[in-house]
């Protein structure tokens, strides 16, 4: 039996494929390389097995998806494939709704047709917006601030409704801010164009691809005035997915939302300092205006993940920066 990993060549999908293999699971990757590279598949295979199956297909292509379930012995699914740029989603909302919701609905239809009932879904702490209470628990109210955020919110709703109606058990994993890379330095995040996210931007400054970091906002109500997030090592996150599948094979049924974070809040300047330590030289940066739509602070209450999945993060900010830098240093142009 195998796990189908949609978006398997992407940043989180690729690290999860490796973690699944290490736990003894058979893996089938599916990706259309819209925001990833065949070279990521080569890197996964080099870390696991050359025989790992990879299907190049668009999840909106229902015939192709049905074929995957016919041709492979799939009994579990992890669904990562999605568009994920907040700003782009504001400019192209219809693309985001069509892709992120269409793929999720089509995938679940194919699962039902193939009698596959276990699904782990890639959600985001973006569904909490700026929570009133921090650390944020899974019981906090949800909503969204961007079309991207709404696609996560709506996907959660769709999956929850489907789980109540058909034979489907789902874990919705709400990620905080994934950073870092595989310790080998052969697998990591490779954003298209100029990175929107903090750590990829910092690392491109460190390798000289970008001149300096703009720190968005120095007047937040935080210890150093910069915004607070819960950065989580991508390998910890990957291990959280394995734990979620294990939980679906016994303890968990229905639809369950779980935070994947560390419970530690770091400011932007904490990240800049940790990155400088890892790189061994200062990261040029300048504090500028706040970025529109940014929230002030959020970090996870990770207690439920520990209780329900038996999972907790093991790696700290220094580990994240060391591994992210190791990847970027060895691959200054990413997979290009
Ligand atoms: C947000 C979403 C997350 C989503 C991600 C996708 C929240 C809480 N999180 O992450 O769910 O998956 O977008 O892009 O809504 N920063 C700078 N300079 C930069 C880049 C970022 O100072 O050049 C700052 C930001 O202002 C923020 C922090 O670094 O305070 C992290 O930013 P980023 O990496 O973009 O992640 P989020 O905005 O938290």
Image: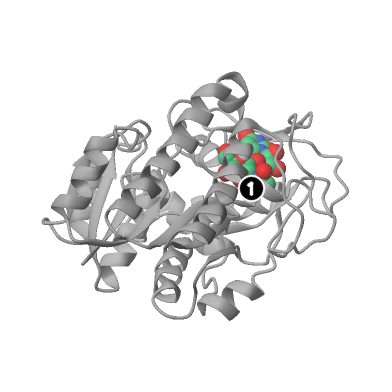
Residue to which mark 1 is pinned: 272
Q: Residue furthest top?
A: 91
In the displayed structure, 277 sits above or below 283; it is below
Where residue 294 sits, quadrant-wise, is top right
Q: Dividing the image into 4 quarters, which one contains the C terminus?
A: top left
Q: Would residue 226 be found to the left or right of residue 188 on screen?
A: right
Where residue 226 sits, quadrant-wise, is top right
Q: Dividing the image into 4 quarters, which one contains the N terminus?
A: bottom left
User: Which color mode does the image show?
Assistant: one colour
**Number of numbered discs on residues:** 1
- The answer to whether residue 107 shows anywhere in this view is yes
* Most foreground residue, 274 or 51: 51
Q: Position of residue 136 (x, y in %)?
A: 74, 62
**Element carrying mark 1:** helix
Q: Where is residue 170 in the image (x, y as percent from the top left)?
A: 48, 62
Q: Where is residue 8 in the image (x, y as percent from the top left)?
A: 32, 48
């Amino acid at each position: 039996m195998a796990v189908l990993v949609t978006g398997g060549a992407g940043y989180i999908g690729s690290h999860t494929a490796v973690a699944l293999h290490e736990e003894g699971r058979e893996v089938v990757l599916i990706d259309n390389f819209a925001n990833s590279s065949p070279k990521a598949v080569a890197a996964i295979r080099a870390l696991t097995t050359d025989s790992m199956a990879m299907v190049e297909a668009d999840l909106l292509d229902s015939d192709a998806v049905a074929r995957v379930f016919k041709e492979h012995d799939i009994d579990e699914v992890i669904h990562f494939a999605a568009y994920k740029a907040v700003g782009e989603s504001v400019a192209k909302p219809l693309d985001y709704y069509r892709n992120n919701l269409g793929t999720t609905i089509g995938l679940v239809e194919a699962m039902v047709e193939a009698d596959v009932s276990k699904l782990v879904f890639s959600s985001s702490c973006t569904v909490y917006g700026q929570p009133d209470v921090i650390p944020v628990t899974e019981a906090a109210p949800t909503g969204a601030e961007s079309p991207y955020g709404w696609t996560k919110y709506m996907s959660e709703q769709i999956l929850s409704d489907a789980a109540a109606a058909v034979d489907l058990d789902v874990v919705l994993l709400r990620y905080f801010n994934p950073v870092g890379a595989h310790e080998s330095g052969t697998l990591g995040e490779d954003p298209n164009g100029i990175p929107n996210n903090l750590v990829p931007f910092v690392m491109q400054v460190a390798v000289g691809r970008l001149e300096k970091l703009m720190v968005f906002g120095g007047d937040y109500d935080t210890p150093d005035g910069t915004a607070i997030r819960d950065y989580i090592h991508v390998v910890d996150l990957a291990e959280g997915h394995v734990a979620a599948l294990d939980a679906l094979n016994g303890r968990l049924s229905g639809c369950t939302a779980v935070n994947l974070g560390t419970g530690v809040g770091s400011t932007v300047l904490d990240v800049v300092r940790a990155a400088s330590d890892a790189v061994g030289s200062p990261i040029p940066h300048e504090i500028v205006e706040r970025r529109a739509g940014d929230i002030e602070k959020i970090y996870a209450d990770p207690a439920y993940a520990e209780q329900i999945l038996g999972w907790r993060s093991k790696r700290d900010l220094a580990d994240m920066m060391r591994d992210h830098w190791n990847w970027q240093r060895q691959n200054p142009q990413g997979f290009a």
